[in-house]
Amino acid sequence: MGGMGPAASALFYQMVTERTEASCDQEHIDLLLWSCASMPDRTACLLTGRKEELYQKLLSEARLLERAGCTALAIPCNTSHVFAPRLERDLTIPLVNMVEAAADEAKRRGWRKAAIFATDGTVQNGLYQKACAARDIDALVPEGAVQRQVMRVIYDRVKAGSRVTMADMAPLLNWREQMGCDGAILACTELSLARRHLGLDRTWADAMAALADAAILACGGRLKKG
């Protein structure tokens, strides 16, 4: 279930295709992408008391995919995972959890301290702090000017259709290094787009790439090696 935002959803479909081990069309997984761009802004709803409105919309669109015959649900939007436990209870198909997949990736890399760059909604609901703590990883989230810069990159650059530059990302990198983090989790799908454009290295773990891998496996596909 995509559309949050549309460009990130297109990248997710591309990632699933690129990361699948396949020698012909038929070895790829079947995928139905519903780009629900009319979904209310997740962070705005969470911070203004409109959580139930947002949840009912998420559930309605998820059930559309369920009725279409999908056997697993992936949502390339980190903030919407605030509702992951409710969706798992209210649906008959499993949710491929993006936050858990990204935290697992940080654990596989041997990180003990990770910077979390995400929307205010994701940060304030503690999604990555909880998932990382369960894996003995210290999750650090920026405050003040650095977090405002994260939100500017997400909303004023990527969602607005502008290309992100390394100058935009420099405050994030500097903060990460000052805090002594082993790496950073890009915990917003707009930041996944920034990573692709800038060619950021493996010290930046991409939550959407982790979701793509988990979705491939959940649907019986094979991952490319390397």
Image (cartoon, rainbow, N blue to C red):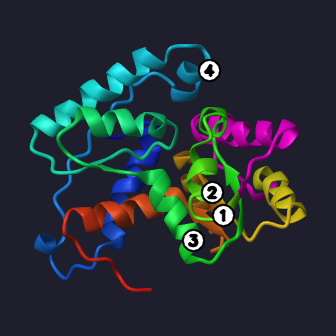
Looking at marks 3 and 4 on the same chain, the residue that comes earlier in the sequence is marked by 4
- Residues in magenta? 139-167
Residue 212 is situated, as x and y percent measured from the top left of the image, at: 38, 61
Identified by mark 4, the residue type is Leu
Foreground label between 3 and 2 = 2
Do residues under tags 3 and 4 come within 8 Å of each other at their CB atoms?
A: no
**Looking at the image, is 157 positioned above or below residue 182?**
above
Inspect the image, locate mark 1, and give the three-letter code of the amino acid beneath it.
Ile
Tell me which residue sits at (22%, 71%) in the image: 221
Task: Tell which tag, 3 or 4, sits nearer the viewer.
Answer: 3
Q: CA distance from mark 1 to mark 2?
A: 5 Å
Secondary structure under tag 2 reads helix
Circle 2 is placed at which residue position?
133
Q: Nearer the viewer, mark 4 or mark 1?
A: 1
Residue 207, image x and y in percent?
52, 57
Cβ atoms at labels 1 and 3 below 8 Å apart: yes
Q: Nearer the viewer, residue 95 or 69?
A: 95
Residues at marks 3 and 4, CA–CA distance in whole angstroms: 30 Å
Camera-side residue: 24 or 207?
207
Q: Say whether residue 166 is magenta.
A: yes
Q: Amino acid at mark 3?
A: Lys
Left or right placement of residue 76 versus residue 157 in this view: left
Image check: 153 left or right of 39? right
* Residue under numbered circle 3: 107
Residue 90 place in picture, x, y as percent: 25, 32
Q: Are marks 4 and 1 in contact (CB under 8 Å)?
A: no
Quadrant housing residue 210: bottom left
| Residue 47: mark | 4
Distance between mark 1 and mark 3 Cα atoms: 7 Å
Q: Horizontally, is 90 left or right of 224 in the view?
A: left
